[in-house]
Image: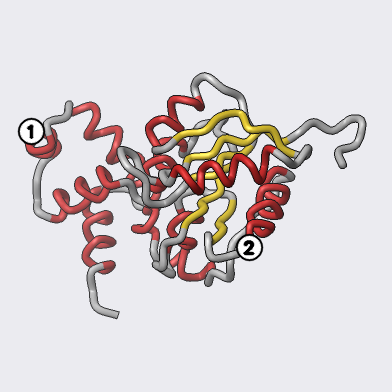
Amino acid sequence: MPGPQSRPIAVVIAEKNPLLQSSLVKLLGSDERFSIAGVANDGQRFLELLDKTAFRVGVIGWEMPVVDGRGVLQSLRGRSDAPRLIVYTGSANPDVPRQAMTLGAAGFCSKREPPEQLVDTILAVATGRMVFPFIDVASLASDPLAGLTPRERELLAALAGGLTNQQMATQLDISLNTVKFHLKNLYDKLAVGNRAQAVAFFLKGREPR
């Protein structure tokens, strides 16, 4: 039971399955530690709710229409007002927790776990903790490419192909300034100082292990 000074944790749920969405609303709505601030059936609607509603924790699917879980996490990277996000999925891909962590999620919970596990994960994440199954953190450091956005990956491949900034802008139908913006972020993420180093990094990452 919340103490006199505590407030319910405001949660927004993004779940494509209507039955599961309803079950989650019932599960959390019946627990006085939580308040349902909104519900969305895809990532785009979740992002729209973020601009209209204040909430502490978002529970998002990984595979969703329009904008998926990866897209949501990428959209919120660097936003100071972003809620803490938990990826809640039934995906059998064992790499999803690692990808979610790399992209900035605060927690991960499998739909194969009992519902109480999700409740515990929300409570922990709301207090600032990170909740993930065992992940070899060394693998995160050894694969910075996993943290790149799709656009940054495109630009990195274009760099490796020898394209100039102007050629990349034309090929991707974006402005030259946008190319420069993405390249700066790309260099920062890879901890390199120029395109030659970025290309060398890219080629090294494509070597068989």
- Looking at the picture, tell me which residue is in the foreground, 29 or 134: 29
The image quadrant of residue 57 is: top right
In which quadrant is the C terminus drawn?
bottom left
Q: Residue at x 63, y 32 (%)?
A: 36
**Mark 1 — residue?**
170
Q: Residue at x 24, y 29 (%)?
A: 178
Q: Are marks 1 and 2 in contact (CB under 8 Å)?
A: no
Amino acid, disc 1: Thr
Q: Is residue 133 left or right of residue 205?
A: right
- Looking at the picture, tell me which residue is in the foreground, 150 or 183: 150
Q: Label 1 neighbourhood size at 10 Å, few (<14), some (14-19), many (20+)?
A: few
Q: Is residue 82 left or right of residue 193?
A: right
Q: Is residue 165 left or right of residue 204?
A: left
- Looking at the picture, tell me which residue is in the foreground, 197 or 99: 99
Rendering coords of residue 95 (x, y %): 42, 66
Q: CA distance from mark 1 to mark 2?
A: 50 Å
Q: Residue at x 25, y 43 (%)?
A: 151
Label 2 SS: loop
Q: Label 2 neighbourhood size at 10 Å, few (<14), some (14-19), many (20+)?
A: few
Rendering coords of residue 118 (x, y %): 63, 54
Q: Is residue 198 above or below residue 188?
A: below
Amino acid, disc 2: Pro
Label 1 SS: helix
In the displayed image of the protein, which residue is found farthest to the top? 52
Q: Is residue 79 above or below residue 63?
A: above
**Mark 2 — residue?**
114
Rendering coords of residue 64 (x, y %): 37, 45
